[in-house]
Amino acid sequence: MTTHRISAYRTAEAALRSPHLKQALYDAGAVVMADVLLTLHGAEHAARRAVEVRVFRRNFLRHYARDVYPQTLEATLAPFIAAGGADLIELGYRATANLTADFAGIDRPEQTAQETEALIRLVKKFSEGATMVHSTRSKAVLEAEVLEALAEFDVRFCRPSVARRLAILESGQADALPRDVLSVILEARDELPIGDAELCREMAFYMQAGAHSTANAMVHGFHELSNWAAGSAERAARLHDPVFIQRAVHESLRLHPASPEAWRTATDAIALPGAETIAIGDRVELDLYLANRDVSVFGAEADRFDPDRSVPEGVLPSGLSFGIGLHACLGRELDGGTLVRPGTDPDSHQYGIVAMLIARLFELGARTDATDPPTPDAKTSRPNWGRYPVRFAAL
Ligand code: HEM
Protein backbone atom coordinates (compact mmCIF):
# COMPACT_ATOMS: atom_id res chain seq x y z
CA MET A 1 0.00 0.00 0.00
CA THR A 2 1.45 3.33 -1.08
CA THR A 3 0.37 6.67 0.35
CA HIS A 4 0.04 9.51 -2.15
CA ARG A 5 0.12 13.08 -0.79
CA ILE A 6 -1.68 15.54 -3.06
CA SER A 7 -1.58 19.28 -2.58
CA ALA A 8 -2.28 20.62 -6.10
CA TYR A 9 -5.79 22.10 -6.33
CA ARG A 10 -6.80 20.51 -9.65
CA THR A 11 -5.56 17.04 -8.66
CA ALA A 12 -7.31 17.25 -5.28
CA GLU A 13 -10.54 18.35 -6.97
CA ALA A 14 -10.36 15.39 -9.39
CA ALA A 15 -9.72 13.03 -6.47
CA LEU A 16 -12.77 14.31 -4.56
CA ARG A 17 -14.88 13.72 -7.67
CA SER A 18 -13.56 10.21 -8.32
CA PRO A 19 -16.01 7.35 -7.61
CA HIS A 20 -12.99 5.04 -7.21
CA LEU A 21 -11.78 6.70 -4.04
CA LYS A 22 -13.50 5.81 -0.78
CA GLN A 23 -13.60 7.92 2.42
CA ALA A 24 -10.71 6.97 4.76
CA LEU A 25 -10.18 9.91 7.15
CA TYR A 26 -12.62 8.58 9.72
CA ASP A 27 -11.43 4.96 9.88
CA ALA A 28 -9.79 5.73 13.25
CA GLY A 29 -12.98 7.40 14.45
CA ALA A 30 -15.23 4.48 13.47
CA VAL A 31 -16.68 4.34 16.97
CA VAL A 32 -18.83 7.34 16.04
CA MET A 33 -18.40 7.52 12.24
CA ALA A 34 -19.05 3.94 11.02
CA ASP A 35 -21.75 3.83 8.31
CA VAL A 36 -22.71 7.49 8.49
CA LEU A 37 -23.34 9.40 5.26
CA LEU A 38 -19.80 10.76 5.15
CA THR A 39 -18.21 7.29 5.39
CA LEU A 40 -20.61 5.29 3.21
CA HIS A 41 -19.45 4.54 -0.31
CA GLY A 42 -20.89 3.79 -3.75
CA ALA A 43 -24.53 2.75 -4.07
CA GLU A 44 -25.15 2.81 -0.29
CA HIS A 45 -23.89 6.38 -0.07
CA ALA A 46 -25.88 7.51 -3.12
CA ALA A 47 -29.11 6.00 -1.76
CA ARG A 48 -28.78 7.61 1.68
CA ARG A 49 -27.70 10.97 0.23
CA ALA A 50 -30.70 10.99 -2.14
CA VAL A 51 -32.98 10.69 0.91
CA GLU A 52 -31.22 13.23 3.16
CA VAL A 53 -30.68 15.89 0.52
CA ARG A 54 -34.47 16.47 0.55
CA VAL A 55 -34.06 18.53 3.72
CA PHE A 56 -31.61 20.95 2.09
CA ARG A 57 -33.80 22.44 -0.66
CA ARG A 58 -33.17 26.11 -1.35
CA ASN A 59 -36.62 27.47 -0.40
CA PHE A 60 -36.48 25.79 2.95
CA LEU A 61 -32.94 27.03 3.61
CA ARG A 62 -34.01 30.58 2.79
CA HIS A 63 -37.04 30.33 5.08
CA TYR A 64 -34.92 28.87 7.88
CA ALA A 65 -32.15 31.48 7.60
CA ARG A 66 -34.51 34.46 7.32
CA ASP A 67 -37.47 33.52 9.52
CA VAL A 68 -36.34 30.92 12.05
CA TYR A 69 -32.66 31.35 12.79
CA PRO A 70 -32.52 35.10 13.67
CA GLN A 71 -34.71 34.47 16.73
CA THR A 72 -32.59 31.51 17.83
CA LEU A 73 -29.49 33.65 17.40
CA GLU A 74 -30.83 36.55 19.48
CA ALA A 75 -31.87 34.16 22.27
CA THR A 76 -28.37 32.65 22.18
CA LEU A 77 -26.70 36.08 22.25
CA ALA A 78 -28.80 37.53 25.08
CA PRO A 79 -26.70 36.25 28.05
CA PHE A 80 -23.44 37.21 26.29
CA ILE A 81 -24.76 40.69 25.56
CA ALA A 82 -25.79 41.01 29.19
CA ALA A 83 -22.23 40.02 30.19
CA GLY A 84 -20.69 42.51 27.73
CA GLY A 85 -18.62 39.91 25.87
CA ALA A 86 -18.14 36.26 24.96
CA ASP A 87 -15.73 33.48 24.24
CA LEU A 88 -16.41 33.10 20.53
CA ILE A 89 -15.80 29.34 20.65
CA GLU A 90 -18.50 28.93 23.30
CA LEU A 91 -20.82 31.36 21.54
CA GLY A 92 -20.21 29.59 18.21
CA TYR A 93 -21.12 26.20 19.63
CA ARG A 94 -24.23 27.53 21.36
CA ALA A 95 -25.34 29.39 18.23
CA THR A 96 -24.86 26.36 16.01
CA ALA A 97 -25.98 23.51 18.30
CA ASN A 98 -29.61 24.48 17.85
CA LEU A 99 -29.15 25.00 14.12
CA THR A 100 -27.71 21.53 13.58
CA ALA A 101 -30.22 19.92 15.94
CA ASP A 102 -33.03 21.49 13.89
CA PHE A 103 -31.61 20.07 10.65
CA ALA A 104 -30.68 16.69 12.12
CA GLY A 105 -34.04 16.25 13.85
CA ILE A 106 -32.90 16.17 17.47
CA ASP A 107 -35.67 17.52 19.71
CA ARG A 108 -34.82 19.60 22.77
CA PRO A 109 -38.03 19.23 24.78
CA GLU A 110 -36.76 21.12 27.85
CA GLN A 111 -35.61 24.19 25.87
CA THR A 112 -33.26 25.12 28.71
CA ALA A 113 -29.67 26.35 28.77
CA GLN A 114 -28.70 23.16 30.66
CA GLU A 115 -30.15 21.02 27.88
CA THR A 116 -28.20 22.95 25.21
CA GLU A 117 -25.04 22.64 27.32
CA ALA A 118 -25.54 18.87 27.61
CA LEU A 119 -25.96 18.60 23.85
CA ILE A 120 -22.84 20.69 23.22
CA ARG A 121 -20.82 18.57 25.63
CA LEU A 122 -21.87 15.44 23.71
CA VAL A 123 -21.27 17.03 20.31
CA LYS A 124 -17.75 18.10 21.30
CA LYS A 125 -17.02 14.53 22.32
CA PHE A 126 -18.33 13.24 18.96
CA SER A 127 -16.12 15.75 17.12
CA GLU A 128 -13.12 14.69 19.14
CA GLY A 129 -13.95 11.04 18.34
CA ALA A 130 -14.52 11.65 14.62
CA THR A 131 -11.16 13.38 14.23
CA MET A 132 -9.37 10.79 16.36
CA VAL A 133 -6.73 10.44 13.65
CA HIS A 134 -5.49 13.96 14.56
CA SER A 135 -5.96 13.63 18.30
CA THR A 136 -3.05 14.07 20.68
CA ARG A 137 -4.86 12.06 23.41
CA SER A 138 -4.88 8.30 24.19
CA LYS A 139 -7.06 6.56 21.58
CA ALA A 140 -8.38 3.95 24.04
CA VAL A 141 -9.45 6.55 26.60
CA LEU A 142 -11.06 8.71 23.93
CA GLU A 143 -12.93 5.75 22.42
CA ALA A 144 -14.41 4.84 25.82
CA GLU A 145 -15.51 8.45 26.35
CA VAL A 146 -17.15 8.56 22.92
CA LEU A 147 -19.07 5.33 23.56
CA GLU A 148 -20.35 6.73 26.83
CA ALA A 149 -21.40 9.96 25.11
CA LEU A 150 -23.20 7.99 22.37
CA ALA A 151 -25.14 6.00 24.97
CA GLU A 152 -26.24 9.19 26.74
CA PHE A 153 -27.16 10.86 23.43
CA ASP A 154 -29.20 7.83 22.43
CA VAL A 155 -31.28 7.67 25.61
CA ARG A 156 -31.72 11.38 26.19
CA PHE A 157 -32.06 12.75 22.64
CA CYS A 158 -32.16 10.16 19.88
CA ARG A 159 -34.79 7.70 21.07
CA PRO A 160 -37.35 10.35 22.15
CA SER A 161 -36.89 12.17 18.80
CA VAL A 162 -37.38 8.91 16.88
CA ALA A 163 -40.43 7.94 18.98
CA ARG A 164 -42.13 11.31 18.38
CA ARG A 165 -41.67 11.08 14.63
CA LEU A 166 -42.73 7.43 14.43
CA ALA A 167 -45.92 8.27 16.36
CA ILE A 168 -46.71 11.01 13.82
CA LEU A 169 -46.04 8.62 10.92
CA GLU A 170 -48.13 5.85 12.48
CA SER A 171 -51.06 8.21 12.96
CA GLY A 172 -50.98 8.68 9.17
CA GLN A 173 -50.09 12.39 9.40
CA ALA A 174 -46.79 12.48 7.51
CA ASP A 175 -47.49 16.15 6.63
CA ALA A 176 -47.14 17.02 10.31
CA LEU A 177 -43.57 15.69 10.49
CA PRO A 178 -40.91 18.32 11.21
CA ARG A 179 -38.66 18.95 8.23
CA ASP A 180 -35.37 17.32 9.21
CA VAL A 181 -32.99 14.49 8.36
CA LEU A 182 -34.41 12.12 10.98
CA SER A 183 -37.93 12.51 9.57
CA VAL A 184 -36.88 11.79 5.99
CA ILE A 185 -34.87 8.74 7.09
CA LEU A 186 -37.85 7.36 9.02
CA GLU A 187 -40.22 8.10 6.16
CA ALA A 188 -37.95 6.14 3.81
CA ARG A 189 -37.26 3.28 6.25
CA ASP A 190 -39.07 0.63 4.16
CA GLU A 191 -36.93 1.22 1.06
CA LEU A 192 -33.80 2.07 3.09
CA PRO A 193 -33.76 0.17 6.41
CA ILE A 194 -31.43 1.43 9.11
CA GLY A 195 -30.66 -0.07 12.55
CA ASP A 196 -31.07 1.85 15.81
CA ALA A 197 -27.33 2.17 16.55
CA GLU A 198 -26.63 3.30 12.97
CA LEU A 199 -29.40 5.88 13.16
CA CYS A 200 -28.01 7.24 16.43
CA ARG A 201 -24.54 7.57 14.84
CA GLU A 202 -26.07 9.33 11.82
CA MET A 203 -27.68 11.89 14.14
CA ALA A 204 -24.44 12.26 16.09
CA PHE A 205 -22.60 12.81 12.80
CA TYR A 206 -24.97 15.59 11.72
CA MET A 207 -24.70 17.26 15.11
CA GLN A 208 -20.93 17.37 15.02
CA ALA A 209 -20.45 17.95 11.27
CA GLY A 210 -22.54 21.12 11.40
CA ALA A 211 -21.69 22.53 14.84
CA HIS A 212 -17.92 22.16 14.89
CA SER A 213 -17.29 23.45 11.36
CA THR A 214 -19.72 26.37 11.67
CA ALA A 215 -18.26 27.50 15.00
CA ASN A 216 -14.72 27.27 13.58
CA ALA A 217 -15.65 29.10 10.38
CA MET A 218 -17.17 31.90 12.44
CA VAL A 219 -14.09 32.37 14.64
CA HIS A 220 -11.60 32.21 11.76
CA GLY A 221 -13.74 34.62 9.69
CA PHE A 222 -14.04 37.07 12.58
CA HIS A 223 -10.29 36.89 13.25
CA GLU A 224 -9.28 37.46 9.62
CA LEU A 225 -11.71 40.33 9.11
CA SER A 226 -10.80 42.07 12.38
CA ASN A 227 -7.09 41.93 11.52
CA TRP A 228 -7.76 43.07 7.96
CA ALA A 229 -9.77 46.11 9.09
CA ALA A 230 -7.54 47.12 12.03
CA GLY A 231 -6.32 50.71 11.73
CA SER A 232 -8.34 51.61 8.61
CA ALA A 233 -11.62 53.51 8.95
CA GLU A 234 -12.36 52.82 5.28
CA ARG A 235 -12.00 49.06 5.77
CA ALA A 236 -13.86 49.09 9.09
CA ALA A 237 -16.84 50.71 7.34
CA ARG A 238 -17.11 47.67 5.06
CA LEU A 239 -17.66 45.42 8.06
CA HIS A 240 -21.29 46.54 8.00
CA ASP A 241 -21.94 45.35 4.44
CA PRO A 242 -23.37 41.79 4.52
CA VAL A 243 -22.42 41.11 0.87
CA PHE A 244 -18.82 41.95 1.69
CA ILE A 245 -18.87 39.87 4.88
CA GLN A 246 -20.22 36.85 3.00
CA ARG A 247 -17.43 37.15 0.43
CA ALA A 248 -14.86 37.51 3.23
CA VAL A 249 -16.24 34.42 4.97
CA HIS A 250 -15.61 32.40 1.80
CA GLU A 251 -12.09 33.76 1.56
CA SER A 252 -11.46 32.88 5.20
CA LEU A 253 -12.92 29.39 4.68
CA ARG A 254 -10.50 28.95 1.78
CA LEU A 255 -7.55 29.72 4.06
CA HIS A 256 -8.88 27.71 7.03
CA PRO A 257 -10.69 24.57 5.86
CA ALA A 258 -12.46 22.93 8.84
CA SER A 259 -11.00 19.63 7.61
CA PRO A 260 -7.48 20.58 6.46
CA GLU A 261 -7.10 17.08 4.99
CA ALA A 262 -9.33 14.58 3.19
CA TRP A 263 -8.19 10.97 3.03
CA ARG A 264 -9.38 8.35 0.59
CA THR A 265 -8.57 4.69 -0.24
CA ALA A 266 -8.55 3.54 -3.88
CA THR A 267 -11.17 0.87 -4.66
CA ASP A 268 -9.69 0.54 -8.20
CA ALA A 269 -6.48 1.52 -9.92
CA ILE A 270 -6.90 5.08 -11.20
CA ALA A 271 -5.03 7.92 -12.83
CA LEU A 272 -5.51 11.47 -11.59
CA PRO A 273 -4.31 14.50 -13.59
CA GLY A 274 -0.94 15.61 -12.28
CA ALA A 275 -0.41 12.58 -10.00
CA GLU A 276 1.36 9.23 -10.28
CA THR A 277 -0.84 6.16 -10.95
CA ILE A 278 -2.79 5.05 -7.91
CA ALA A 279 -3.10 1.30 -7.31
CA ILE A 280 -6.05 -0.47 -5.71
CA GLY A 281 -5.80 -0.23 -1.90
CA ASP A 282 -3.46 2.82 -1.98
CA ARG A 283 -4.19 5.70 0.31
CA VAL A 284 -4.64 9.18 -1.10
CA GLU A 285 -4.12 12.05 1.34
CA LEU A 286 -5.44 15.35 0.05
CA ASP A 287 -3.88 18.39 1.68
CA LEU A 288 -6.81 20.79 1.34
CA TYR A 289 -5.01 23.47 3.32
CA LEU A 290 -2.27 23.62 0.67
CA ALA A 291 -4.60 22.95 -2.31
CA ASN A 292 -6.63 26.00 -1.27
CA ARG A 293 -3.39 28.03 -1.37
CA ASP A 294 -2.26 26.69 -4.77
CA VAL A 295 -0.66 29.67 -6.56
CA SER A 296 -1.53 28.27 -10.00
CA VAL A 297 -5.21 28.76 -9.15
CA PHE A 298 -5.33 31.55 -6.54
CA GLY A 299 -2.34 33.61 -7.70
CA ALA A 300 1.05 34.54 -6.27
CA GLU A 301 -0.51 35.90 -3.08
CA ALA A 302 -2.66 32.84 -2.44
CA ASP A 303 -1.58 32.77 1.21
CA ARG A 304 -2.92 36.24 1.90
CA PHE A 305 -6.42 37.00 3.20
CA ASP A 306 -7.89 39.15 0.44
CA PRO A 307 -11.67 39.48 0.70
CA ASP A 308 -11.76 41.20 -2.72
CA ARG A 309 -9.97 38.31 -4.44
CA SER A 310 -11.48 37.03 -7.67
CA VAL A 311 -11.16 33.33 -8.50
CA PRO A 312 -11.05 31.57 -11.88
CA GLU A 313 -14.28 30.42 -13.54
CA GLY A 314 -15.51 27.15 -12.04
CA VAL A 315 -13.55 27.56 -8.79
CA LEU A 316 -15.50 28.29 -5.60
CA PRO A 317 -14.30 31.30 -3.57
CA SER A 318 -14.13 28.94 -0.57
CA GLY A 319 -11.90 26.56 -2.59
CA LEU A 320 -12.36 22.94 -1.51
CA SER A 321 -13.39 23.79 2.06
CA PHE A 322 -16.94 22.47 1.62
CA GLY A 323 -15.64 19.44 -0.26
CA ILE A 324 -16.75 18.83 -3.85
CA GLY A 325 -18.18 15.93 -5.83
CA LEU A 326 -19.58 12.82 -4.17
CA HIS A 327 -19.38 13.93 -0.53
CA ALA A 328 -19.86 17.68 -1.15
CA CYS A 329 -21.19 19.34 1.99
CA LEU A 330 -24.98 19.35 2.25
CA GLY A 331 -24.79 22.34 4.61
CA ARG A 332 -22.86 24.54 2.18
CA GLU A 333 -25.67 26.90 1.20
CA LEU A 334 -27.09 26.95 4.71
CA ASP A 335 -23.78 28.09 6.20
CA GLY A 336 -22.08 29.79 3.25
CA GLY A 337 -25.19 31.16 1.51
CA THR A 338 -25.74 31.35 -2.23
CA LEU A 339 -23.11 33.11 -4.33
CA VAL A 340 -23.76 36.78 -5.10
CA ARG A 341 -24.32 37.35 -8.83
CA PRO A 342 -24.82 40.57 -10.77
CA GLY A 343 -28.41 41.65 -10.05
CA THR A 344 -28.67 39.74 -6.74
CA ASP A 345 -31.23 41.48 -4.49
CA PRO A 346 -29.45 42.21 -1.16
CA ASP A 347 -32.79 42.17 0.70
CA SER A 348 -33.76 38.64 -0.28
CA HIS A 349 -30.24 37.22 -0.66
CA GLN A 350 -29.22 34.15 1.39
CA TYR A 351 -25.96 35.25 3.09
CA GLY A 352 -25.47 32.06 5.06
CA ILE A 353 -25.41 31.49 8.80
CA VAL A 354 -21.68 32.16 9.24
CA ALA A 355 -21.88 35.62 7.62
CA MET A 356 -25.02 36.38 9.65
CA LEU A 357 -23.21 35.51 12.87
CA ILE A 358 -20.14 37.60 12.02
CA ALA A 359 -22.24 40.57 10.86
CA ARG A 360 -24.02 40.56 14.22
CA LEU A 361 -20.68 40.40 16.08
CA PHE A 362 -19.44 43.50 14.25
CA GLU A 363 -22.73 45.26 14.99
CA LEU A 364 -22.04 44.60 18.67
CA GLY A 365 -18.54 46.05 18.26
CA ALA A 366 -16.86 42.74 19.13
CA ARG A 367 -13.09 43.05 19.59
CA THR A 368 -10.33 41.10 21.30
CA ASP A 369 -9.00 42.17 24.68
CA ALA A 370 -5.19 42.59 24.92
CA THR A 371 -5.24 41.39 28.55
CA ASP A 372 -6.95 38.10 27.61
CA PRO A 373 -5.74 37.12 24.10
CA PRO A 374 -7.09 34.15 22.04
CA THR A 375 -5.26 30.83 22.49
CA PRO A 376 -4.96 27.79 20.16
CA ASP A 377 -6.69 24.47 20.90
CA ALA A 378 -4.12 22.21 22.61
CA LYS A 379 -6.29 19.07 22.29
CA THR A 380 -5.72 18.66 18.56
CA SER A 381 -2.96 19.13 16.01
CA ARG A 382 -5.54 20.86 13.79
CA PRO A 383 -5.01 24.65 13.62
CA ASN A 384 -8.12 25.64 15.64
CA TRP A 385 -8.66 28.21 18.36
CA GLY A 386 -9.27 26.88 21.88
CA ARG A 387 -10.45 30.18 23.41
CA TYR A 388 -11.29 33.42 21.65
CA PRO A 389 -12.51 36.02 24.18
CA VAL A 390 -14.05 39.27 22.84
CA ARG A 391 -15.69 42.33 24.41
CA PHE A 392 -18.72 44.04 22.85
CA ALA A 393 -17.50 47.62 22.57
CA ALA A 394 -20.66 48.98 20.94
CA LEU A 395 -22.81 48.29 24.00
C1 HEM B 1 -18.68 26.21 7.53
C2 HEM B 1 -19.32 25.10 7.79
C3 HEM B 1 -19.07 23.77 7.14
C4 HEM B 1 -17.95 23.30 6.51
C5 HEM B 1 -16.62 24.01 6.29
C6 HEM B 1 -18.24 21.95 6.06
C7 HEM B 1 -17.37 21.16 5.36
C8 HEM B 1 -17.65 19.91 4.85
C9 HEM B 1 -16.75 19.11 4.07
C10 HEM B 1 -15.31 19.47 3.71
C11 HEM B 1 -17.39 17.96 3.73
C12 HEM B 1 -16.85 16.82 2.85
C13 HEM B 1 -15.83 15.97 3.55
C14 HEM B 1 -15.19 14.96 2.63
O1 HEM B 1 -15.33 15.01 1.40
O2 HEM B 1 -14.48 14.09 3.15
C15 HEM B 1 -18.71 18.05 4.32
C16 HEM B 1 -19.67 17.06 4.21
C17 HEM B 1 -20.91 17.16 4.80
N1 HEM B 1 -21.43 18.23 5.50
FE1 HEM B 1 -20.53 19.96 5.90
N2 HEM B 1 -19.52 21.63 6.43
C18 HEM B 1 -20.08 22.71 7.08
C19 HEM B 1 -21.34 22.81 7.63
C20 HEM B 1 -22.30 21.84 7.56
C21 HEM B 1 -23.63 21.94 8.13
C22 HEM B 1 -24.19 23.14 8.87
C23 HEM B 1 -24.25 20.75 7.85
C24 HEM B 1 -25.63 20.28 8.20
C25 HEM B 1 -26.57 20.97 8.81
C26 HEM B 1 -23.31 19.93 7.10
C27 HEM B 1 -23.58 18.67 6.62
C28 HEM B 1 -22.70 17.91 5.89
C29 HEM B 1 -23.02 16.56 5.43
C30 HEM B 1 -24.31 15.82 5.66
C31 HEM B 1 -21.90 16.09 4.75
C32 HEM B 1 -21.70 14.71 4.13
C33 HEM B 1 -22.08 14.67 2.69
C34 HEM B 1 -21.82 13.31 2.10
O3 HEM B 1 -21.00 12.55 2.60
O4 HEM B 1 -22.48 13.00 1.09
N3 HEM B 1 -22.15 20.61 6.94
N4 HEM B 1 -18.85 19.25 4.99
Image (tube, rainbow, N blue to C red):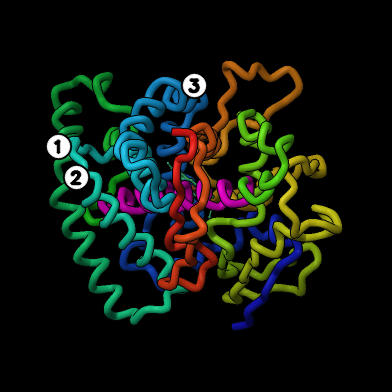
Look at the image and say whether residue 352 sits in the magenta stretch.
no
Query: How packed is label 2: few (under 14 Cα within 10 Å), some, or many (20 or more)?
Result: some
* The magenta segment: 198-225
The type of residue carrying mark 2 is Glu
Residue 298 in view: yes
Give percent across and percent down for residue 153.
20, 53
| In-front residue for pair 251/30 | 251
Mark 1 sits on what residue? Answer: 110
Residue 141, relative to residue 194: is it above or below? below
What's the distance in space between the residues labelled 3 and 2, CA to CA?
30 Å
State if disc 2 and disc 3 touch (CB < 8 Å): no
Q: Secondary structure at mark 3?
A: helix
- Which residue is the site of mark 2? 115
Instruction: Please provide percent x and percent y for residue 341.
Output: 72, 25
Is 92 drawn above or below residue 360 in the view shown? below
Of 26 and 245, the residue lying toward us: 245
Q: Nearer the viewer, mark 3 or mark 2?
A: 2
Q: Position of residue 113 (x, y in %)?
A: 21, 42
Give how far apart the Cα atoms at labels 1 and 2 are. 7 Å
Mark 2 and mark 1 in contact (Cβ < 8 Å)?
yes
- The quarter of the image holding the C terminus is top left
Using the numbered discs, state the Cα–Cα distance from disc 3 to disc 1 in whole angstroms.
29 Å
Disc 2 element: helix
Left or right: where does residue 378 sit relative to residue 202? right
For disc 3, the marked residue is 59
Q: Is residue 213 left or right of residue 18?
A: left
Q: Is residue 131 above or below residue 173?
A: below
Residue 304, by quadrant, is bottom right
First in sequence: mark 1 vs mark 2: 1
